[in-house]
Image: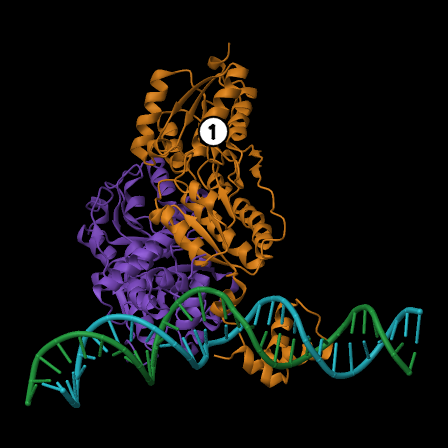
Chain colours: A purple, B orange, C cyan, D green
Amino acid sequence: MVTLAEVARHAGVSASTVSYVLSGKRTISRPTRERVERSIRELGYLPNAGARALASSRSNVIALMMPLRTDMYVPVMMDIALAVATTAREHEQDVLLLTGQEGPAAVRRVVGSGLADAMILMDVELHDARLPLLHESPRPAVLIGLPADTTGLTCVDLDFAATGRLCVEHLAELGHREVALVGEAAAVYERHTGFAERTIAGVRERASELGVRVLHRPCEGSYEAMAGTLSRILQERPGTSGFIVQNESVLGPMLSLLRQQGRAVPEDASIVAICPDEVATQGSVALTSVAIPAREMGRRAVELVMPKVEAAGRNGNGRPVPDRVELLPPRLTVRASTGPAPAAGRP
Amino acid sequence: MVTLAEVARHAGVSASTVSYVLSGKRTISRPTRERVERSIRELGYLPNAGARALASSRSNVIALMMPLRTDMYVPVMMDIALAVATTAREHEQDVLLLTGQEGPAAVRRVVGSGLADAMILMDVELHDARLPLLHESPRPAVLIGLPADTTGLTCVDLDFAATGRLCVEHLAELGHREVALVGEAAAVYERHTGFAERTIAGVRERASELGVRVLHRPCEGSYEAMAGTLSRILQERPGTSGFIVQNESVLGPMLSLLRQQGRAVPEDASIVAICPDEVATQGSVALTSVAIPAREMGRRAVELVMPKVEAAGRNGNGRPVPDRVELLPPRLTVRASTGPAPAAGRP
DNA sequence: ACCGGGAATTGAAGCGCTTCGACAGATGTA
DNA sequence: TACATCTGTCGAAGCGCTTCAATTCCCGGT
């Protein structure tokens, strides 16, 4: 492997000069800079990551902690991860992939060893076990998702409460008075994952303001589960004409089931999905939906964490970047799955 | 941050002794070892990754290069990635996430900078642009997927040719004489992704041996695309009674469509899917399928690469670990979507 | 002709760890 | 008793880079 010293010799300058050419932290005269750059190119020099990390106490790596479980939103997780990786590269950072498996220990390990300069955590629970460590940690972190208490934390997420409200509003405007929220798998609620609970809260809040009745039912991601959930909903509330579906994997089954039962979409039943746009448009009916801005979330997470890394990097003398919670506003796209409530459903 | 030297002082030994306790590369007497371990615990010492990498020229990081595109098998990719991460941790390694975005340059960068000790590449094309670099590279690599020429490469993949054969065999045994292969999106074939082409080859080969007629049609991942593909297949070959489906995202639409057209599964049409088991079991009909062993692939990739890393690490004096191509044998699980061919389809 | 000051460059001191050779002391061998 | 062997520990060199303080050089001002 070519080293800095070899480049310096080849270019006829000192090692520090090469270093400054690379980092741009000091002015280097044009001719010298060009000579050094030429040597770098000719020798195919690449700086050694370990040495750089040791000398500068910056690894230029961001750790991304993903959930190991795959009971929800797999494509969303994937999109977030890829967006994080892509955006990180735009900031000359690499991404270290951690799984939830190791839990808080992973945070400690990565932070303590200087393997990464910062962390991005996904799948945050309301009372996440990793939070105490983050508070003590000297390294910046950004959460994708919202815990119960966000003081001292920087977070990005879709505004799921607003999302819930928006869905209800849309249905209410169309005249629906009885709405069912088909939620995530029960396990998701049992873990107290914030987004699921915030969605319910938003739905309930706006519904009560608008005089809409709401029934919330969790639902596993299979055809049978959906069949059961649907029949139970309709049994309990036969007048239900609007559905808000948060578990993307039952959208297909749901459409099949409604069709089988002779309920036309949107004539007899309207559906608003909370899912990525690709999912909304690839079924037999293009679904009215609130998009989950996965890429945006991944991107913002990196963009929020970078200034903190840089502030911490200047031997801590850059004053700290303030924490903030960034809730992305939901956007509802009307497609073919929502329409006026059937006459029977009206007063 | 606590350093090795501080641990040494605290334990009343030299730095090298602490280092040897940590690595186990020299014998340390029991009392000394315990004293050091205690100091490590009490001080909460974590070795600095950069310093370690610099001194040992081992980063204990494996780079995983994922495709950026998401036009196929997203959950499979995700499972592979998570399995890689999990298995890597069992070997005390971390995983660096790279996207296909940067292409071959990423390989160069990571390998050249010593950021990672080894690479695992996913989504390998038949004539992958990254291969030449791998051949020159001093660092070991494992491919998940098969390029056209595997000399000097270590690869893991499902044996898709055997998978194709197995699907045909199963349908042929049930008496089906006309079979359609519903393939991946056209773009996948245009990229010359090995697995898709190998599946076709396997299907064709066994079909011709068994006197089964095969029609292969690519299919995008949407309901409309599936509708079009299905009607074209049935128009061209009205006698088609068996379907092999490789694009997992059209399985739902396909079942809906067949039902709509009054074709019962499996009475009128049999379906063999090539997809993860979770997908096969969560639709309205449990599908006979060949599983894509995503986790296994991720796990094996790590297990194949580790010995190479270790051999390379012993300052290259461990003799090189031989390359090998590991094709995982397909397993077909019979579920509810395949049955005897309808009478009309028989001689 | 002299000096102050900025611009460009360099030397040297680490960053925290691994590892090699050396060494003291205990143990075995003749 | 003298010598070779092991075992357990240590000192010091060095991995490749960053960065600070110091140095050189050149310029304009007086």
Q: Position of residue B190 (x, y in %)?
A: 34, 31
The correct choice, above or below, for B321 with respect to A118 in the image is above
Determine whether, in the image, residue B177 is placed left or right of residue B230: right
Which residue is at the front of the view, B100 or B264?
Answer: B100
Q: Chain of mark 1?
A: B
Q: According to the image, label 1 marks what residue?
A: B199
Q: Is residue B144 visible?
A: yes
Q: Position of residue A339 (x, y in %)?
A: 20, 45
Q: Give the residue displayed 48% in from the left and 50% down from the top.
A: B119
Q: Give the residue displayed 58% in from the left and 53% down from the top.
A: B316
**What type is the residue that disc 1 sits on?**
Thr
Which image quarter: residue A255? Answer: top left
Q: Is residue A305 visible?
A: no
Q: Position of residue B248 (x, y in %)?
A: 42, 37
Determine whether, in the image, residue B293 is placed left or right of residue A51: right
* Residue ranking furthest to the top: B347
Q: Position of residue B236 (x, y in %)?
A: 35, 16
